[in-house]
Amino acid sequence: MKDKLLTIGQFAAMHGINKKTLMWYDEIGLFKPAVINPENGYRCYNYYQSPILETILLLRELDVSISEIQNFMQNRSAASLKDLLAVKIADLDRNITHLQAVRETLCTHHQNMVTLLTMDLSKIDIIEKKERCLVTVDIDKDTSFEQEVEMITAETIKYQLGRLHQASYGSMISVASLQSGNYDDYSRLFIEIPFLPSKEGLHIQPGGKYLRAFHKGDWDRMPLRYQAILDYAARQGLVLSGYAYEMGINENVIDQINDYIVQIEIPILAY
């Protein structure tokens, strides 16, 4: 079997490719047949060529250019293959991390749409949340919108975030400020970036039970919503702590700001 010659069609079928691919590889000098029949010009291959072809196909699947593969084939050795594969493994790891981040973002958007379709805007719920790490920037009443944009942009560059859609954004106001009636005393903006390399220097949003509520439309009425949340917590004997985390959940499906819905989540310290 191993010594028997295979036709180009048989050899192509064995490797799951089109025979025109083998013809092209032969024409550019990348992978030549074992024998060419002098009478009819038919290309024939043997079993021992399979590992070499599979290596070429693997490299092509990793988007290695033809010129790179040709250079490897001309200097084929264990060392050169090891070096080439090390580079491609690093590239693949970066792509996997990117795709995982995109998937995480899609899941967040999907969950937002599920929430949007099932929520009762008037209802205040108690939910369970997992701990998450947030990149934050400090703001105060004097921070302009332009300054906020500059700071957010700087953080996305710092953490090599390719596009804005790859993260979730929001604002934070302390429970102490809310309880003091300072409803515009926002102190931080947050960015949730999937797959951060380290927790060092990041804000840890604690896991556990949270009060969750929603606000739609006019921002001037946000204090009334917070007052309703605080009243609910008092009636239920709940102790709130830390920060209220605000995040828009429907920006990508609305045209008017009055339709904007903010999700509010506040940690419960005691229950």
Image: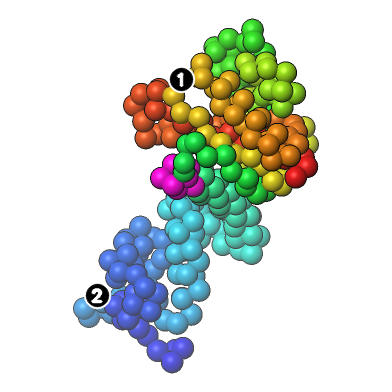
Compare residues 239 and 163 and report the one nearer the observer.
Answer: 239
| Circle nearer the N terminus (1, 2) | 2
Outermost top residue: 142
Q: Residues within 10 Å of mark 1 (few under 14, many from 20)?
A: few
| Residue 8 on the magenta span | no
Range of the magenta residues? 110-118
Residue on which the image places disc 1: 218
- Left or right of residue 222, residue 189 in this image: right
Q: Amino acid at mark 1?
A: Asp
Name the residue: 58% across, 33% down: 264
Residue on which the image places disc 2: 41
Taking 116 as reference, is 36 above or below it? below
Q: Secondary structure at mark 1?
A: loop
Compare residues 135 and 175 and report the one nearer the observer.
Answer: 175
- Left or right of residue 5, residue 159 in this image: right
Residue 268, position as x, y percentages in the image:
72, 40
Magenta stretch secondary structure, dominant? helix
Residue 236, position as x, y percentages in the image:
69, 40
Q: Amino acid at mark 2?
A: Gly
User: Image quadrant of residue 113?
Assistant: top left
Taking 52 as reference, is 144 above or below it? above
